[in-house]
Amino acid sequence: MDKTINQKAWFLVLPVFLVVAFSAVLPLMTVVNYSMQDTFGNNQFFWNGVGWFKELLDPSTDLGGRFLASLGRNLFFSAVILAIEVPLGIIVALSMPREGWSVAACLVILALPLLIPWNVVGTIWQIFGRPDIGLLGYVLNHLGLNYNYVSNEVDAWVTVIVMDVWHWTSLVALLCYAGLKSIPDAYYQAAQIDGASRWAVFKAIQLPKMNRVLLIAVLLRFMDSFMIYTEPFVVTGGGPGNSTTFVSIELVKIALGQFDLGKAAALSLVYNLIILIVCWVFYTVMVNAGSERPAKEGAA
C-alpha cells in the first residue's frame, strides 16, 4: 500500500519562515547592501564594491588598525573569561548540595546575578569601583593599591573581567549542576565499591557526563563575551584611551559616532563571520573529543 504524502504541512511553518525573513534575512541583506556602498548624507549612496572590506583587513589603514586592535582585545578578553569562569563554575557546581532545602536556596542565590540587566550591572560596578564613593575603590586605595579604573589600563581591565566573572559564572555553575544531577547514583555506588578517590570520580564519571553541558556553557560564554558591549561601555566607555574598546564599541563609534554606514556594515559582517567560525570550531572540537572518548573506552 502506497503511503500518501501530504505537503500541506509546510503551510503550518510558513508563518515562521515569514517572521524569520522579516526579522533576520531582510536586515542582513540591508547590511550587505550598505557594506558595498558609501554615503555622504542626504540618503545618497555610491557604489564602493569590496573597498571597505579591503580597508578593514589592512592593518596599515586607520579602519584596519582600529579593527584588528579591538579584535585582539576581544579575543584576549574571551580567553581570560573562559579560563576563569568555566573552572570556577565547575567548582561551584561540585560544592553545591544535592538534596534538601539548601538546594533551592543555592539555586536562587546563583540565579540572582543573571536576573540583573546588563546596563544595571555596568552602573553597579561603575559606582562600586569609584575611588571616591565606591566601596571597592575606597577599600583598595585604603590598602595602598592606588586603584583607579578611569586612568589606569590594568585597573580597567581587572574591573571589566571581575565584573563579567561576577555576572556570568552563575550560568556555568547552573549548567554544570544540571549535568551533575543527571548522573545516576549507581555510578557513585560503583566508584565507592572500587575505592575510587574524589579526583578519580570527577575525572571518570562527573566530567564525562558534563561534557555536553560544558559545550553549551563554553559556546554561550564565548558568544556573550565576544559580543560584550553594555557593561564595559557603561563602566569605562572603552577607556582609558582605547584600552577596553572592543569590536562592538568600535562598531558603535563608527556607525553612530562617525555615521560611516558602509564601514560599519562591513565591520559588522566580518564581526559576525568571526563569531560563527570560532563557534563552529569550538563545537566541532568538543563534539569530536566527546565522541572519541567512548570509542577509546570501548576499545580498552
Image (cartoon, helix red, strand yellow):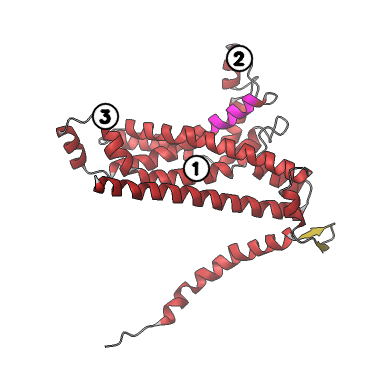
Mark before the other along the chain sequence, 3 or 1: 3
In the rendered image, residue 219, in percent from the top left (x then y), is placed at: 48, 46
Q: CA distance from mark 2 to mark 1?
A: 31 Å
| Residue 175 figure quarter | top left
Q: Are marks 3 and 2 in contact (CB under 8 Å)?
A: no
Nearer the observer, 221 or 18:
221
State which tag comes first along the sequence, 2 or 1: 2
Residue 11, compared with residue 241, is above or below; it is below
Identity of the amino acid at label 1?
Arg
Mark 3 vs mark 2, foreground winner is 3
Q: How many neighbours does mark 2 have within 10 angstroms: few (below 14), some (14-19), or many (20 or more)?
A: few
For the stretch drawn in magenta, the main secondary structure is: helix
Image quarter in which the N terminus is found: bottom left
Q: Who's the residue at 66% across and 34% down the image?
A: 244
Query: Which residue is depicted at the point 64% across and 15% down?
Result: 146
Q: Is residue 5 visible?
A: yes
Report, in whole angstroms, how far the alpha carbon at label 3 lies from the one at label 1: 28 Å
Asked whether 248 falls inside the magenta stretch, the response is no
Q: Does the segment drawn in magenta span residue 159?
A: yes
Nearer to us of marks 3 and 1 is: 3
As shown in the figure, which amino acid type bears the numbered disc 2? Leu
101 vs 270: above or below: above
Magenta span covers which residues? 154-163
Residue occupied by mark 2: 145
Secondary structure at badge 1 equals: helix
Give me the disc on residue 198.
Answer: 3
Amino acid carrying label 3: it is Arg
Q: Which residue is mark 1?
A: 221
Mark 3 or mark 2, which has the lower sequence index?
2
Q: Mark 1: few, some, or many residues within 10 Å (few <14, many ≥20)? A: many
